[in-house]
Image (spheres, rainbow, N blue to C red):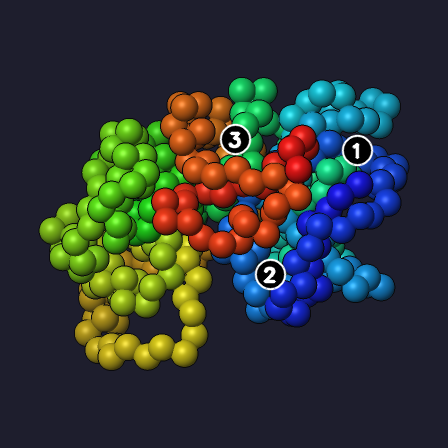
Amino acid sequence: MRALTVVPQQPGSLRVSELPDPEPGPGELLVQGLALGVCGTDKEIVGGAYGWSPDGADRLVLGHESLGRVRQAPPGSRFQPGDLVVGVVRRPDPVPCGACAHGEFDMCRNGRYTERGIKQRHGYGSELWTVEQDYAVPVDPRLERTGMLLEPTTVVAKAWEQVERVGARAWFDPKRVLVTGAGPIGLLAALLGVQRGLDVHVLDRVSTGPKPRLVRALGATYHTEPAGDVAERLEPDVVIEATGVGSVVLDVMRNNAAYGIVCLTGVSAAGRSLPVDAGALNREIVLENDVVLGSVNANLRHYHQGAEALAKADPEWLANLVTRRVPLGRAAEAFTAGQDDVKVVVTLTGGE
């Protein structure tokens, strides 16, 4: 079979490799890979920033935004050949820590978790892959072309869950949400906000192309002005921050509503300093009962929440999120940004 592989932490090592077909172990599904979403994490691994191969392997099979069709299932499994499935990315650490022991492996306390396509486990970027049936998530048959959006949807499903849990510390009745960043994470966060009946606003730098259209098609409002100006005018009850841009993070923290919640999902690059009046920021957060929290990854509960959200979404809107599809044989093209890219997908069957 063909697989998309890299030598972790070695730039320029991306290639399509020929590997033996996998053999499913006890309790595992054999899955025909259909498509693979490409995200910033994948690009950083390809660029040599990080990534770790499985023990004893030089190369890592890339890919964590999966979609496949079950080819073979164990006897008595809840899955049948032909089912659409997505594979969970993270596995709990073997110790395990308290969080992992309770199924909350997205909150691992000791960092010994592993991740498909990222850390010490081969990913889903191959024509065939296997997955433990307990870490396979069924998706609606209508998501045959967009089911690879489930993994990024789990990220925002967790973010919304965390926001709502924090809000429940007292009376909580949010009306307005600001999402900063109109990439896939931001747009999916906006989708889940609309599904909650909120007044959703999305901020991004671009004024043309698919992003404004996608936001407006949700019934949300699109903004391109400076983050501080937009947040000050809106005073959002909830902010889902998906850019990782330090100045944007600070602007929304300073200008949300009282008893507001800012959830950070974007990862900021190190090495850039910004002047911050830490005392004034601390004063605002304390006196207004504000909360700022970070959220990353997802556990099985969030995968099922995400699958439910995608099943309720407009299929045409989801399809329009995927702005470019690249066959596996030309997968390197998916790692070069296009002007109007939102979500780029590598197709694993058919084509070159």
Q: CA distance from mark 1 to mark 2?
A: 26 Å
Location of the C terminus (image quadrant): top right
Give x and y (percent) for residue 81. Answer: 76, 21
Q: Along the line of sight, which residue is nearer the eye, 224 or 242?
A: 224
Give x and y (percent) for residue 278. Answer: 25, 77
Give x and y (percent) for residue 55. Answer: 81, 63
Q: Residue at image x 42%, y 49%?
A: 338
Q: Which residue is mark 2?
A: 46
How many other residues sit within 10 Å of disc 1, few (<14), some (14-19) or many (≥20)?
many
Residue 237's disc is none
107 with respect to 164 (left or right): right
121 with respect to 164 (left or right): right
- Disc 2 marks which amino acid? Val
Q: Which residue is mark 1?
A: 30
Q: Along the line of sight, which residue is nearer the eye, 71 or 266?
A: 71
Q: Residue at image x 24%, y 79%?
A: 275
Judged from the image, the secondary structure of the residue bearing numbered disc 3 is loop
Q: Along the line of sight, which residue is nearer the eye, 68 or 306?
A: 68
Please tell me in which quadrant of the rendered image residue 100 appears.
bottom right
Residue 146's disc is 3
Contact, mark 1 vs mark 3 (Cβ under 8 Å): no
